[in-house]
Amino acid sequence: MPEGPTFAPPTDQSILLPFAGTRREIAEYEAHGGYQSLRKAVGMTGEQLVEEMIASNLRGRGGAGFPAGRKASFLAPGGERYLVINADESEPGTFKDREIILRNPHMLIEGILIYLWMIRGTAAYIYIRGEYHKEAAILEGAIAQAREQGYVGSPLMGTDYVPEVYVHRGAGAYICGEETALLSSLNGDRGQPTAKPPFPAVSGAFKKPTLLNNVETVATVPVILGMGGAAYAGIGTEQSTGTKMFSLSGHVRHPGNYEMPLSATYRDLIEGQGGGLPEGRTLKAFVPGGSSMPILMPNQLDTGLSFEAVVAAGSMAGSGAVIVVDDRTCMVRFALRTAEFYMHESCGKCTPCREGTRWITELLRKQEAGLGSSEEIDLLLDICDRVEGNCLCVLGDACAMPVRSHIRNFRDEFEEHARLGRCPCPDDAPMSELYPPLLRAPLPMVAAT
Ligand SMILES: Cc1cc2nc3c(=O)[nH]c(=O)nc-3n(C[C@H](O)[C@H](O)[C@H](O)COP(=O)(O)O)c2cc1C
Protein backbone atom coordinates (compact mmCIF):
# COMPACT_ATOMS: atom_id res chain seq x y z
CA MET A 1 0.00 0.00 0.00
CA PRO A 2 1.60 3.28 -1.03
CA GLU A 3 2.58 5.58 1.81
CA GLY A 4 2.79 9.34 2.00
CA PRO A 5 1.13 12.02 -0.03
CA THR A 6 -0.22 10.14 -2.97
CA PHE A 7 -2.88 12.50 -4.25
CA ALA A 8 -2.44 14.14 -7.57
CA PRO A 9 -2.57 17.92 -7.46
CA PRO A 10 -6.13 18.98 -8.19
CA THR A 11 -6.77 19.72 -11.82
CA ASP A 12 -9.37 22.10 -13.15
CA GLN A 13 -11.63 19.07 -13.44
CA SER A 14 -11.07 17.98 -9.86
CA ILE A 15 -14.16 18.78 -7.83
CA LEU A 16 -13.61 16.87 -4.65
CA LEU A 17 -10.98 19.42 -3.75
CA PRO A 18 -10.96 18.64 -0.05
CA PHE A 19 -9.73 15.16 -1.02
CA ALA A 20 -6.56 16.83 -2.22
CA GLY A 21 -5.63 18.15 1.20
CA THR A 22 -5.47 16.82 4.73
CA ARG A 23 -8.17 18.30 6.95
CA ARG A 24 -8.35 16.05 9.92
CA GLU A 25 -9.29 18.74 12.45
CA ILE A 26 -12.87 19.91 12.46
CA ALA A 27 -11.87 23.61 12.70
CA GLU A 28 -9.80 23.27 9.55
CA TYR A 29 -12.60 21.44 7.75
CA GLU A 30 -15.14 24.08 8.79
CA ALA A 31 -12.78 26.85 7.69
CA HIS A 32 -12.92 25.37 4.19
CA GLY A 33 -16.72 25.32 4.10
CA GLY A 34 -17.14 22.05 5.96
CA TYR A 35 -20.60 21.25 7.42
CA GLN A 36 -22.22 23.95 5.23
CA SER A 37 -23.81 21.29 3.03
CA LEU A 38 -25.30 19.75 6.17
CA ARG A 39 -26.76 23.13 7.05
CA LYS A 40 -28.24 23.31 3.57
CA ALA A 41 -29.61 19.77 3.91
CA VAL A 42 -31.36 20.55 7.19
CA GLY A 43 -33.36 23.20 5.31
CA MET A 44 -34.62 20.50 2.94
CA THR A 45 -37.02 17.59 3.36
CA GLY A 46 -35.92 13.98 3.02
CA GLU A 47 -37.80 13.75 -0.30
CA GLN A 48 -36.05 16.83 -1.64
CA LEU A 49 -32.68 15.37 -0.69
CA VAL A 50 -33.46 12.09 -2.41
CA GLU A 51 -34.47 14.09 -5.50
CA GLU A 52 -31.15 15.95 -5.38
CA MET A 53 -29.29 12.66 -5.20
CA ILE A 54 -31.28 11.27 -8.13
CA ALA A 55 -30.54 14.45 -10.10
CA SER A 56 -26.81 13.98 -9.46
CA ASN A 57 -26.99 10.46 -10.90
CA LEU A 58 -24.22 9.46 -8.48
CA ARG A 59 -23.44 5.76 -8.79
CA GLY A 60 -22.24 3.79 -5.78
CA ARG A 61 -18.46 3.66 -5.43
CA GLY A 62 -18.35 0.29 -3.63
CA GLY A 63 -18.17 -1.83 -6.77
CA ALA A 64 -21.54 -2.43 -8.38
CA GLY A 65 -22.19 1.18 -9.39
CA PHE A 66 -25.83 1.14 -8.29
CA PRO A 67 -27.46 4.61 -8.47
CA ALA A 68 -27.23 6.07 -4.96
CA GLY A 69 -30.38 8.21 -5.18
CA ARG A 70 -32.51 5.30 -6.30
CA LYS A 71 -31.16 3.15 -3.50
CA ALA A 72 -32.07 5.84 -0.96
CA SER A 73 -35.58 6.05 -2.42
CA PHE A 74 -36.21 2.37 -1.63
CA LEU A 75 -36.34 3.06 2.10
CA ALA A 76 -39.96 3.56 3.16
CA PRO A 77 -40.38 6.55 5.51
CA GLY A 78 -41.00 6.19 9.25
CA GLY A 79 -39.97 3.74 11.98
CA GLU A 80 -36.63 2.47 13.18
CA ARG A 81 -34.05 2.49 10.36
CA TYR A 82 -30.29 2.52 10.02
CA LEU A 83 -27.52 3.81 7.85
CA VAL A 84 -24.50 1.56 7.43
CA ILE A 85 -21.27 2.72 5.86
CA ASN A 86 -19.16 0.08 4.18
CA ALA A 87 -15.54 0.78 5.13
CA ASP A 88 -14.44 -2.84 4.83
CA GLU A 89 -12.24 -2.14 1.80
CA SER A 90 -10.59 -5.51 1.32
CA GLU A 91 -10.49 -5.97 -2.45
CA PRO A 92 -6.81 -6.35 -3.38
CA GLY A 93 -5.55 -3.16 -4.97
CA THR A 94 -8.17 -0.92 -3.35
CA PHE A 95 -7.02 1.68 -0.82
CA LYS A 96 -9.11 4.78 -1.57
CA ASP A 97 -11.57 4.70 1.35
CA ARG A 98 -8.63 4.44 3.71
CA GLU A 99 -7.16 7.63 2.34
CA ILE A 100 -10.46 9.51 2.51
CA ILE A 101 -10.72 8.53 6.17
CA LEU A 102 -7.09 9.38 6.89
CA ARG A 103 -7.21 12.80 5.26
CA ASN A 104 -10.80 13.97 5.38
CA PRO A 105 -12.78 12.06 8.00
CA HIS A 106 -15.18 14.98 8.42
CA MET A 107 -16.17 14.83 4.80
CA LEU A 108 -17.43 11.31 5.45
CA ILE A 109 -19.08 12.33 8.72
CA GLU A 110 -20.82 15.27 7.07
CA GLY A 111 -22.06 12.92 4.33
CA ILE A 112 -23.29 10.51 6.99
CA LEU A 113 -25.19 13.26 8.81
CA ILE A 114 -26.82 14.42 5.56
CA TYR A 115 -27.82 10.83 4.81
CA LEU A 116 -29.10 10.32 8.36
CA TRP A 117 -31.21 13.48 8.14
CA MET A 118 -32.49 12.39 4.71
CA ILE A 119 -33.78 9.06 6.03
CA ARG A 120 -34.28 10.24 9.65
CA GLY A 121 -32.09 7.31 10.61
CA THR A 122 -32.02 5.92 14.13
CA ALA A 123 -28.21 5.75 13.95
CA ALA A 124 -25.33 5.21 11.56
CA TYR A 125 -22.72 2.45 11.86
CA ILE A 126 -19.39 2.67 10.08
CA TYR A 127 -18.31 -0.94 9.57
CA ILE A 128 -14.54 -0.70 9.20
CA ARG A 129 -12.05 -3.34 8.15
CA GLY A 130 -10.33 -4.96 11.14
CA GLU A 131 -6.82 -4.11 9.95
CA TYR A 132 -7.62 -0.39 9.74
CA HIS A 133 -6.57 0.37 13.34
CA LYS A 134 -5.32 3.88 12.69
CA GLU A 135 -8.26 4.75 10.46
CA ALA A 136 -10.76 3.55 13.08
CA ALA A 137 -9.04 5.70 15.72
CA ILE A 138 -9.15 8.73 13.40
CA LEU A 139 -12.84 8.20 12.82
CA GLU A 140 -13.50 7.91 16.56
CA GLY A 141 -11.60 11.16 17.09
CA ALA A 142 -13.48 12.95 14.32
CA ILE A 143 -16.84 11.77 15.65
CA ALA A 144 -15.85 13.05 19.11
CA GLN A 145 -15.03 16.45 17.58
CA ALA A 146 -18.36 16.50 15.70
CA ARG A 147 -20.07 15.61 18.98
CA GLU A 148 -18.36 18.51 20.76
CA GLN A 149 -19.51 20.86 18.01
CA GLY A 150 -23.09 19.62 18.45
CA TYR A 151 -23.38 17.88 15.06
CA VAL A 152 -23.61 14.40 16.64
CA GLY A 153 -25.58 13.36 19.73
CA SER A 154 -27.48 16.67 20.06
CA PRO A 155 -30.56 18.09 18.33
CA LEU A 156 -29.34 18.88 14.82
CA MET A 157 -29.17 22.59 14.00
CA GLY A 158 -32.34 23.69 15.78
CA THR A 159 -34.39 20.61 14.85
CA ASP A 160 -35.54 17.88 17.23
CA TYR A 161 -33.60 15.21 15.34
CA VAL A 162 -30.62 13.71 17.19
CA PRO A 163 -28.15 11.86 14.93
CA GLU A 164 -25.87 9.15 16.30
CA VAL A 165 -22.78 7.69 14.62
CA TYR A 166 -20.83 4.63 15.77
CA VAL A 167 -17.69 2.90 14.53
CA HIS A 168 -17.93 -0.89 14.38
CA ARG A 169 -14.71 -2.76 13.73
CA GLY A 170 -14.68 -5.91 11.63
CA ALA A 171 -12.27 -8.77 12.13
CA GLY A 172 -10.51 -8.78 8.78
CA ALA A 173 -12.68 -11.01 6.60
CA TYR A 174 -12.98 -9.96 2.95
CA ILE A 175 -16.45 -11.46 2.73
CA CYS A 176 -17.70 -8.93 5.31
CA GLY A 177 -17.47 -6.27 2.59
CA GLU A 178 -20.40 -7.99 0.86
CA GLU A 179 -23.43 -6.17 2.16
CA THR A 180 -25.47 -9.07 3.56
CA ALA A 181 -22.39 -10.63 5.20
CA LEU A 182 -21.49 -7.24 6.65
CA LEU A 183 -24.98 -6.87 8.10
CA SER A 184 -24.90 -10.41 9.52
CA SER A 185 -21.59 -9.59 11.19
CA LEU A 186 -22.92 -6.27 12.51
CA ASN A 187 -25.94 -8.13 13.89
CA GLY A 188 -23.63 -10.44 15.84
CA ASP A 189 -24.11 -13.42 13.55
CA ARG A 190 -21.45 -15.22 11.53
CA GLY A 191 -20.18 -12.95 8.74
CA GLN A 192 -21.61 -14.84 5.81
CA PRO A 193 -23.87 -13.70 2.97
CA THR A 194 -27.59 -14.35 3.08
CA ALA A 195 -30.02 -14.80 0.20
CA LYS A 196 -31.79 -11.71 -1.17
CA PRO A 197 -34.68 -10.93 -0.72
CA PRO A 198 -35.01 -9.65 1.88
CA PHE A 199 -32.89 -6.72 0.73
CA PRO A 200 -31.22 -4.47 3.30
CA ALA A 201 -33.81 -1.77 2.56
CA VAL A 202 -36.36 -4.11 4.14
CA SER A 203 -34.31 -6.06 6.68
CA GLY A 204 -30.74 -5.05 7.44
CA ALA A 205 -29.05 -3.83 10.61
CA PHE A 206 -30.91 -5.26 13.61
CA LYS A 207 -33.42 -6.64 11.07
CA LYS A 208 -34.65 -3.10 10.38
CA PRO A 209 -34.73 -1.19 7.07
CA THR A 210 -31.18 -0.16 6.28
CA LEU A 211 -29.42 1.98 3.72
CA LEU A 212 -25.90 0.70 3.07
CA ASN A 213 -23.32 2.63 1.07
CA ASN A 214 -19.61 2.77 0.48
CA VAL A 215 -17.37 5.38 2.18
CA GLU A 216 -16.60 7.24 -1.04
CA THR A 217 -20.28 7.33 -2.08
CA VAL A 218 -21.27 8.98 1.20
CA ALA A 219 -18.24 11.30 1.33
CA THR A 220 -19.27 12.64 -2.09
CA VAL A 221 -22.69 13.77 -0.86
CA PRO A 222 -21.53 17.09 0.71
CA VAL A 223 -19.97 17.99 -2.65
CA ILE A 224 -23.20 17.17 -4.47
CA LEU A 225 -25.28 19.29 -2.13
CA GLY A 226 -22.73 22.08 -2.26
CA MET A 227 -22.76 22.36 -6.05
CA GLY A 228 -26.25 20.97 -6.72
CA GLY A 229 -27.18 17.58 -8.16
CA ALA A 230 -27.67 18.83 -11.71
CA ALA A 231 -24.26 20.56 -11.78
CA TYR A 232 -22.61 17.39 -10.47
CA ALA A 233 -24.33 15.41 -13.23
CA GLY A 234 -22.62 17.70 -15.74
CA ILE A 235 -19.23 16.19 -14.88
CA GLY A 236 -18.13 12.83 -16.24
CA THR A 237 -20.37 11.02 -18.71
CA GLU A 238 -24.14 10.85 -18.88
CA GLN A 239 -24.29 7.42 -17.26
CA SER A 240 -21.27 7.83 -14.95
CA THR A 241 -21.36 11.27 -13.45
CA GLY A 242 -18.83 13.14 -11.36
CA THR A 243 -15.31 12.25 -10.37
CA LYS A 244 -14.10 9.08 -8.73
CA MET A 245 -11.11 8.00 -6.71
CA PHE A 246 -8.83 5.47 -8.41
CA SER A 247 -6.24 3.45 -6.52
CA LEU A 248 -3.33 2.98 -8.91
CA SER A 249 -0.76 0.28 -8.12
CA GLY A 250 1.52 -2.32 -9.69
CA HIS A 251 4.26 -1.54 -12.19
CA VAL A 252 3.74 2.17 -12.47
CA ARG A 253 6.04 5.05 -11.61
CA HIS A 254 3.70 6.94 -9.32
CA PRO A 255 1.28 4.63 -7.54
CA GLY A 256 -1.34 6.28 -5.38
CA ASN A 257 -4.90 7.53 -5.22
CA TYR A 258 -6.05 9.84 -7.97
CA GLU A 259 -9.32 11.62 -8.39
CA MET A 260 -10.41 11.50 -12.02
CA PRO A 261 -13.50 12.74 -13.85
CA LEU A 262 -15.32 9.68 -15.14
CA SER A 263 -14.99 11.01 -18.69
CA ALA A 264 -11.20 10.39 -18.58
CA THR A 265 -9.49 7.22 -19.84
CA TYR A 266 -7.18 4.57 -18.41
CA ARG A 267 -4.39 6.13 -20.45
CA ASP A 268 -4.99 9.47 -18.67
CA LEU A 269 -4.73 7.68 -15.35
CA ILE A 270 -1.84 5.27 -15.99
CA GLU A 271 0.34 7.36 -18.28
CA GLY A 272 -0.84 10.83 -17.28
CA GLN A 273 -1.21 10.75 -13.51
CA GLY A 274 0.77 7.58 -12.87
CA GLY A 275 3.71 8.56 -15.11
CA GLY A 276 3.57 5.30 -17.06
CA LEU A 277 5.67 2.20 -16.44
CA PRO A 278 9.21 2.25 -15.06
CA GLU A 279 12.04 2.70 -17.54
CA GLY A 280 12.51 -0.19 -19.94
CA ARG A 281 9.27 -1.98 -19.20
CA THR A 282 6.20 -2.30 -21.36
CA LEU A 283 2.56 -2.85 -20.53
CA LYS A 284 1.37 -6.44 -20.65
CA ALA A 285 -2.13 -6.00 -19.19
CA PHE A 286 -3.99 -4.00 -16.57
CA VAL A 287 -6.67 -4.73 -14.00
CA PRO A 288 -9.33 -2.04 -14.42
CA GLY A 289 -11.31 -2.24 -11.17
CA GLY A 290 -9.93 -4.50 -8.45
CA SER A 291 -8.53 -8.02 -8.51
CA SER A 292 -11.93 -9.60 -9.16
CA MET A 293 -12.33 -8.00 -12.58
CA PRO A 294 -11.30 -9.42 -15.95
CA ILE A 295 -8.01 -7.92 -17.12
CA LEU A 296 -7.78 -5.55 -20.07
CA MET A 297 -5.01 -5.47 -22.67
CA PRO A 298 -2.62 -2.69 -23.80
CA ASN A 299 -4.72 -1.96 -26.88
CA GLN A 300 -7.58 -1.08 -24.52
CA LEU A 301 -5.73 1.73 -22.74
CA ASP A 302 -8.00 4.33 -24.31
CA THR A 303 -11.05 2.76 -22.68
CA GLY A 304 -12.99 5.31 -20.64
CA LEU A 305 -13.05 5.09 -16.84
CA SER A 306 -16.87 5.22 -16.86
CA PHE A 307 -18.88 2.21 -15.72
CA GLU A 308 -20.39 1.75 -19.19
CA ALA A 309 -17.09 2.05 -21.08
CA VAL A 310 -15.42 -0.65 -19.00
CA VAL A 311 -18.37 -3.00 -19.50
CA ALA A 312 -18.22 -2.38 -23.26
CA ALA A 313 -14.51 -3.29 -23.12
CA GLY A 314 -15.37 -6.63 -21.50
CA SER A 315 -14.69 -5.95 -17.83
CA MET A 316 -16.09 -3.88 -14.95
CA ALA A 317 -15.06 -0.69 -13.18
CA GLY A 318 -15.57 -2.31 -9.75
CA SER A 319 -13.96 -0.49 -6.86
CA GLY A 320 -11.68 1.61 -9.06
CA ALA A 321 -8.47 -0.26 -8.21
CA VAL A 322 -6.20 -0.19 -11.26
CA ILE A 323 -3.26 -2.59 -11.24
CA VAL A 324 -0.61 -2.16 -13.93
CA VAL A 325 1.14 -5.35 -15.11
CA ASP A 326 4.43 -5.22 -17.01
CA ASP A 327 5.95 -7.50 -19.64
CA ARG A 328 8.05 -9.52 -17.15
CA THR A 329 5.05 -10.81 -15.25
CA CYS A 330 4.06 -14.46 -15.37
CA MET A 331 0.33 -14.33 -16.02
CA VAL A 332 -0.18 -17.87 -14.71
CA ARG A 333 1.44 -16.91 -11.43
CA PHE A 334 -0.62 -13.73 -11.32
CA ALA A 335 -3.83 -15.71 -11.91
CA LEU A 336 -2.76 -18.14 -9.18
CA ARG A 337 -2.07 -15.36 -6.70
CA THR A 338 -5.51 -13.91 -7.40
CA ALA A 339 -7.26 -17.29 -7.08
CA GLU A 340 -5.43 -18.04 -3.82
CA PHE A 341 -6.85 -14.90 -2.31
CA TYR A 342 -10.43 -15.80 -3.19
CA MET A 343 -10.01 -19.40 -2.08
CA HIS A 344 -8.68 -18.18 1.24
CA GLU A 345 -11.48 -15.65 1.67
CA SER A 346 -14.36 -17.88 0.54
CA CYS A 347 -16.62 -18.16 3.56
CA GLY A 348 -17.50 -21.74 2.64
CA LYS A 349 -21.25 -21.30 2.95
CA CYS A 350 -22.14 -22.26 -0.62
CA THR A 351 -20.66 -25.21 -2.47
CA PRO A 352 -19.79 -23.70 -5.88
CA CYS A 353 -17.63 -21.03 -4.24
CA ARG A 354 -16.09 -23.21 -1.54
CA GLU A 355 -15.21 -26.06 -3.91
CA GLY A 356 -14.76 -24.00 -7.08
CA THR A 357 -12.23 -21.51 -5.72
CA ARG A 358 -10.17 -24.35 -4.26
CA TRP A 359 -10.28 -26.41 -7.43
CA ILE A 360 -9.30 -23.41 -9.56
CA THR A 361 -6.39 -22.71 -7.21
CA GLU A 362 -5.17 -26.32 -7.24
CA LEU A 363 -5.24 -26.49 -11.02
CA LEU A 364 -3.43 -23.18 -11.33
CA ARG A 365 -0.75 -24.39 -8.93
CA LYS A 366 -0.18 -27.40 -11.12
CA GLN A 367 -0.16 -25.23 -14.20
CA GLU A 368 2.31 -22.76 -12.76
CA ALA A 369 4.65 -25.54 -11.68
CA GLY A 370 4.58 -26.91 -15.24
CA LEU A 371 2.72 -30.03 -14.15
CA GLY A 372 -0.53 -29.20 -15.92
CA SER A 373 -1.78 -29.96 -19.40
CA SER A 374 -3.71 -28.39 -22.23
CA GLU A 375 -6.80 -30.37 -21.19
CA GLU A 376 -6.57 -28.96 -17.71
CA ILE A 377 -6.55 -25.44 -19.09
CA ASP A 378 -9.92 -26.27 -20.67
CA LEU A 379 -11.00 -27.82 -17.40
CA LEU A 380 -10.13 -24.57 -15.64
CA LEU A 381 -12.33 -22.65 -18.06
CA ASP A 382 -15.12 -25.15 -17.49
CA ILE A 383 -14.90 -24.75 -13.71
CA CYS A 384 -14.93 -20.96 -14.06
CA ASP A 385 -18.15 -21.27 -16.08
CA ARG A 386 -19.71 -23.48 -13.43
CA VAL A 387 -18.79 -21.16 -10.56
CA GLU A 388 -19.83 -17.88 -12.13
CA GLY A 389 -23.43 -16.93 -11.48
CA ASN A 390 -24.02 -19.96 -9.27
CA CYS A 391 -22.95 -18.71 -5.86
CA LEU A 392 -24.82 -17.07 -3.00
CA CYS A 393 -22.81 -13.89 -3.53
CA VAL A 394 -20.33 -12.88 -6.22
CA LEU A 395 -17.16 -13.92 -4.36
CA GLY A 396 -17.03 -17.06 -6.50
CA ASP A 397 -17.42 -14.95 -9.64
CA ALA A 398 -14.64 -12.72 -8.35
CA CYS A 399 -12.31 -15.70 -8.59
CA ALA A 400 -13.62 -17.10 -11.87
CA MET A 401 -13.78 -13.89 -13.90
CA PRO A 402 -10.12 -12.81 -13.72
CA VAL A 403 -8.82 -16.37 -14.11
CA ARG A 404 -10.90 -16.88 -17.25
CA SER A 405 -9.67 -13.58 -18.68
CA HIS A 406 -6.02 -14.52 -17.98
CA ILE A 407 -6.48 -17.77 -19.89
CA ARG A 408 -8.38 -16.17 -22.78
CA ASN A 409 -5.76 -13.45 -23.26
CA PHE A 410 -2.64 -15.47 -22.45
CA ARG A 411 -3.50 -19.04 -23.44
CA ASP A 412 -0.09 -19.41 -25.11
CA GLU A 413 1.67 -18.65 -21.86
CA PHE A 414 -0.41 -21.27 -20.04
CA GLU A 415 0.33 -23.82 -22.79
CA GLU A 416 4.05 -23.01 -22.62
CA HIS A 417 4.14 -23.91 -18.93
CA ALA A 418 2.64 -27.29 -19.75
CA ARG A 419 4.92 -27.88 -22.74
CA LEU A 420 8.17 -26.95 -20.97
CA GLY A 421 7.23 -28.59 -17.70
CA ARG A 422 8.20 -25.43 -15.82
CA CYS A 423 7.46 -21.75 -15.56
CA PRO A 424 9.24 -19.98 -18.43
CA CYS A 425 9.37 -16.64 -16.62
CA PRO A 426 12.39 -15.47 -14.61
CA ASP A 427 12.33 -16.27 -10.91
CA ASP A 428 12.45 -12.62 -10.03
CA ALA A 429 9.36 -11.76 -12.07
CA PRO A 430 7.88 -8.87 -10.13
CA MET A 431 4.86 -10.40 -8.41
CA SER A 432 5.49 -8.76 -5.09
CA GLU A 433 4.84 -5.35 -6.63
CA LEU A 434 1.42 -6.52 -7.72
CA TYR A 435 0.22 -7.90 -4.43
CA PRO A 436 1.95 -8.49 -1.12
CA PRO A 437 2.55 -12.20 -0.49
CA LEU A 438 -0.82 -13.62 0.37
CA LEU A 439 -1.13 -17.25 1.07
CA ARG A 440 1.62 -19.62 1.92
CA ALA A 441 -0.48 -22.30 3.56
CA PRO A 442 0.37 -25.72 2.15
CA LEU A 443 -2.14 -26.86 -0.40
CA PRO A 444 -1.90 -30.46 -1.55
CA MET A 445 -1.14 -30.70 -5.23
CA VAL A 446 -3.66 -33.22 -6.48
CA ALA A 447 -4.80 -34.30 -9.87
CA ALA A 448 -8.08 -32.56 -10.56
CA THR A 449 -9.62 -35.27 -12.67
C1 LIG B 1 -17.18 -10.33 -1.82
C2 LIG B 1 -17.58 -8.89 -1.83
C3 LIG B 1 -16.81 -7.93 -1.17
C4 LIG B 1 -17.19 -6.60 -1.17
N1 LIG B 1 -16.41 -5.69 -0.50
C5 LIG B 1 -16.80 -4.39 -0.46
C6 LIG B 1 -16.03 -3.44 0.28
O1 LIG B 1 -15.00 -3.76 0.87
N2 LIG B 1 -16.47 -2.16 0.30
C7 LIG B 1 -17.62 -1.76 -0.35
O2 LIG B 1 -18.01 -0.60 -0.27
N3 LIG B 1 -18.35 -2.65 -1.05
C8 LIG B 1 -17.98 -3.94 -1.11
N4 LIG B 1 -18.76 -4.84 -1.79
C9 LIG B 1 -20.01 -4.35 -2.42
C10 LIG B 1 -21.14 -4.27 -1.35
O3 LIG B 1 -21.81 -5.53 -1.31
C11 LIG B 1 -22.17 -3.19 -1.70
O4 LIG B 1 -22.61 -3.38 -3.02
C12 LIG B 1 -21.63 -1.77 -1.57
O5 LIG B 1 -21.03 -1.55 -0.31
C13 LIG B 1 -22.78 -0.80 -1.73
O6 LIG B 1 -22.32 0.53 -1.65
P1 LIG B 1 -22.50 1.56 -2.85
O7 LIG B 1 -23.92 1.41 -3.36
O8 LIG B 1 -22.25 2.88 -2.25
O9 LIG B 1 -21.51 1.18 -3.90
C14 LIG B 1 -18.38 -6.19 -1.84
C15 LIG B 1 -19.14 -7.15 -2.53
C16 LIG B 1 -18.74 -8.47 -2.53
C17 LIG B 1 -19.58 -9.46 -3.28
Image: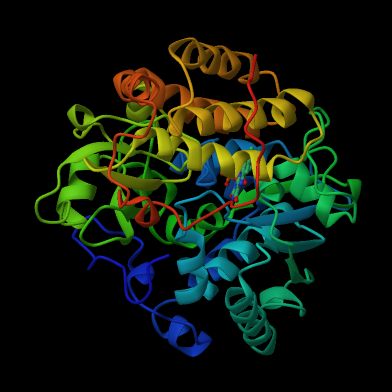
Q: Position of residue 211 (x, y in %)?
A: 71, 47
Quadrant assignment for the C terminus: top right
Residue occupying image coordinates x 63% and y 21%? 447
Quick check: can you spot residue 326?
yes
Q: Give 163 or 256, whichever is nearer the viewer.
A: 256
Q: Give the quadrant of residue 188.
A: bottom right
Q: Position of residue 389 (x, y in %)?
A: 64, 19
Q: Position of residue 77 (x, y in %)?
A: 79, 44
Query: What colour scheme does the image use?
Result: rainbow
Q: Give the quadrant of residue 334.
A: top left
Q: Give 348 or 23, whichever is nearer the viewer.
A: 348
* Number of numbered discs overlaid on the protein picture: 0
Residue occupying image coordinates x 53% and y 65%? 40
Quadrant assignment for the N terminus: bottom left
Residue occupying image coordinates x 76% and y 77%? 155
> Would residue 417 be found to the left or right of residue 335 on screen?
left
Establish if 230 lies above or below 220.
above
Q: Quadrant of ligand 1?
A: top right
- The residue positioned farthest toward the front in the image shown: 421
Q: Give the quadrant of residue 253.
A: bottom left
> Would residue 175 be found to the left or right of residue 198 on screen?
left
- The residue positioned farthest toward the left in the image shown: 280
Establish if 88 lies above or below 132.
above
Quick check: can you spot residue 264?
no
Q: Position of residue 274 (x, y in %)?
A: 21, 56
Q: Give 411 or 9, whichever is nearer the viewer.
A: 411
